[in-house]
Image (cartoon, helix red, strand yellow):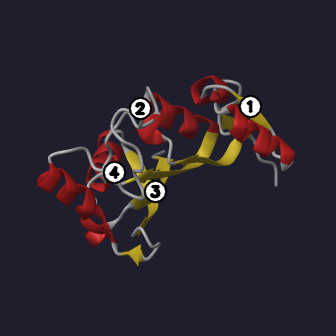
Amino acid sequence: MDAQGIEIDEDAVRKCVSRGVSVYHGDMLEGMEMFDDDEFDCVVLSQTLQQALEPVRVVEEMLRVGKVGIISFPNFAHWRSRLRLLFSGRAPVTSTLPYTWYETPNLRVITVRDFYGFCKERDLRIADSMFFTPTYVRLPSFLANLFASIAIFVVERRN
């Protein structure tokens, strides 16, 4: 199995290299431009979409270079985040979203329901999905928007 990583954080690049993982040090869009169409069977975007400056382009590129994309992100609609915002009037800080608003790398607020809408608007096929609580208990999809802290989607282009 061949793998190729793209990472912007220098410390993370060093860790990848020390483990023998080939990695491009730089922006994910620049890194994906180096690859041909359908060069990979699968492209993984792990808890990064909410930090992307151009999330639509990131998803388009990952599905250009890969046949399948696996996208995970923190669900900002989790009930604890909602309650913290409701009762404190402040941006929530949770175990899944551990940053204050001024320190967070997150640029986007993504919910499970938002991502379903995104895929429908972009005519992407959701091949599978998984949703987990903060303690990694798997949830059925009908509970995901309110109770999942992490969402994982397997998406494909429609042909």
Question: Circles 4 and 1: CB distance less than 8 Å?
Answer: no
Q: Is residue 55 above or below residue 89?
A: above
Residue 135 horizontal/vertical position (percent)? 45, 73
Look at 37% across and 61% down and name the residue there: 149
Q: Which residue is mark 1?
A: 24
Query: Looking at this view, is 28 or 16 the one in front?
Result: 16
Residues at marks 2 and 4, CA–CA distance in whole angstroms: 26 Å
First along the sequence among labels 3 and 1:
1
In the figure, 120 relative to 31: above or below? below
Visible residue check, residue 39: no
Three-letter code for the amino acid on which mark 2 is drawn? Val
Q: Nearer the viewer, mark 4 or mark 1?
A: 4
Q: Which residue is mark 2?
A: 56
Residue 53 in sight from this viewpoint: yes
Helix, strand, or loop for circle 1?
Answer: strand
Vertical side of 81 occupied by 100: above or below: above
Q: Separation of disc 2 and disc 1 at Cα?
A: 21 Å
- Residue type beneath disc 4: Val
Marks 4 and 1, Cα distance to the nearest angstrom?
31 Å
Give the mark nearer the N terminus: 2 vs 4. 2
Q: Quadrant of residue 1?
A: bottom right
Contact? badges 2 and 1 (CB < 8 Å)? no
Left or right of residue 52, residue 89 in this image: left
**Viewer-proximal residue among 79 and 138:** 79
Q: Earlier in the sequence, mark 2 or mark 1?
A: 1
Amino acid carrying mark 3 in the image: Phe
Q: Which residue is the site of mark 4?
A: 93
